[in-house]
Structure formats: C-alpha cells, structure tokens
Amino acid sequence: MKRIFINLLLLLAATPLWAQSDPEYKMEIGAGVGMMGYLGDFNESLTKDLQPMATVLARYNMSPYMDLKMNVSFGKMKGSSADVKTYYPRFASAPYKFDNSLVDVGFAYEYNFLPYGTGRDYRGAQRLSPYVTVGLGATYVNIKDGDRKSALSANLPIGLGVKYKVGERMNVGLEWALHFSLSDELDGQKDPYGIKSSGLFKNTDCYSTLQFTFSYSFMAKCRTCHNEDE
C-alpha cells in the first residue's frame, strides 16, 4: 500500500513537467477568407468596392518571434471611372467599368512583437501577439474589359496583424496588408489620362487585403535542441 501511495505521488509530481514540455512546431498550414480592395486610377478609397477573397497558406516557424509564410490568394477587384473626380477624356461619354479576377502568390517575413506560443513550449511565450509583415509576390489579373486580356506584375506587400493560439496546434489571425504592384494595368487601363509617368511605384495600381485566417501546426521540433535561454 505504501509503495502504491509513493508511486501515485511521483505520478502527480511528474504531470506538471509533462504539461510544460508541449512541443514547438515547425510548420503551419491553413486558409483564410476576407475582403480585397482596388486602389488606382479609378478608386482612391480603402473601403470602396471591397470584394471577397480566399487564401491558402503555409508558414514556417523560425522562432517564437519570426515566421516565413507562403500564400496563394484568389480574389476580385472592381471599379469605375465614374467613381472618381478626375476627368478622363477617353471615358467622357461612357464611364469605364471593370470587374477583374486576381491570383496572388506571395512570400512574406513576419515579426511577432511578443514571443508567440502556448507559454509551455517556450518560456515567456504569449498566446496573443501583434506582428508586422513584409514580402514579395506575383499578381496575375484576368481582365474582362480593357486594353488587354490579362496583366502580370510583381508586388510588394506590407501589413500588420494579430495572431492568437487557440490551442496547442490551432491558430487564428487577422491581417491587413497593402500590396504595391509594379503595374498600372491591373484595372485594364494603362495611363488613362494619357500622361506617361516614370519611377518604380509612380502611378501604379495597388490593392489591399483584410482577412481572417485559421492554421494548424504540425512537425514538432526536437525537444532537446532548445537554446539555453529558452
């Protein structure tokens, strides 16, 4: 009886240690839904003509502070020359309207302001952390009505967000980003006022994204490979 009692005490004492040894995970895979908005010659508002979008993503967790993310996003952008005060001689008699579909493939670096985790896998980790993100991507647009049928451009996304660890493997997040493209033809029109411009981002089209994401963590890191300060 005494031996059983001692074994029970040892088992109870070991339970907190097991709870504190939850593994860190190297990878995440997930998806997101949200809204996408066009910014360019025919729209100057971040909140006008927002269109639905969807995303699939994969994330590599470098550390509790840093992540690398790859995403493939699908969305739409729309606008009209009638929505802006600028006078376009080409569209004086009939306003130009567009409703284009878009595919974005991007790679981004994320920096968490707080060490992100359950608090059991990394000392001082927080379930909730804001972050900033910057990256490089490619944008393909299928143009319904315009001077050309499609457009392909590089884009530079810059954004911020917040992520929350619901459970050991479950993560949710909210992210807003502005994608600066290198093209003035995402809306189907190039230099609609007839004045050519020069410069890397001068008079180019942009689009914003606001999305809610969900991801699942997998591929546990080595338990004995932690740094001494973790």
Image: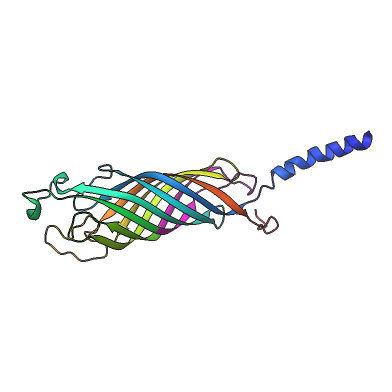
Q: Position of residue 147 (x, y in %)?
A: 17, 60
Who is closer to the viewer here, 170 or 2? 170
- Does the magenta-highlighted stretch encompass residue 127? yes
Q: Position of residue 133 (x, y in %)?
A: 43, 54
Residue shown at 69% from the left, 45% from the top: 20
Residue shown at 81% from the left, 40% from the top: 11
Which quadrant of the figure contains the N terminus? top right
Q: Relative to residue 159, is residue 95 drawn left or right?
A: left
Q: Relative to residue 89, is residue 121 drawn left or right?
A: right
Who is closer to the viewer here, 180 or 211? 211
Residue shown at 55% from the left, 40% from the top: 166
Can residue 180 be seen in this snapshot? yes
Q: Which residues are magenta?
A: 106-134
Q: Position of residue 154 (x, y in %)?
A: 33, 63
Q: Position of residue 219 (x, y in %)?
A: 61, 55
Residue shown at 31% from the left, 54% from the top: 102
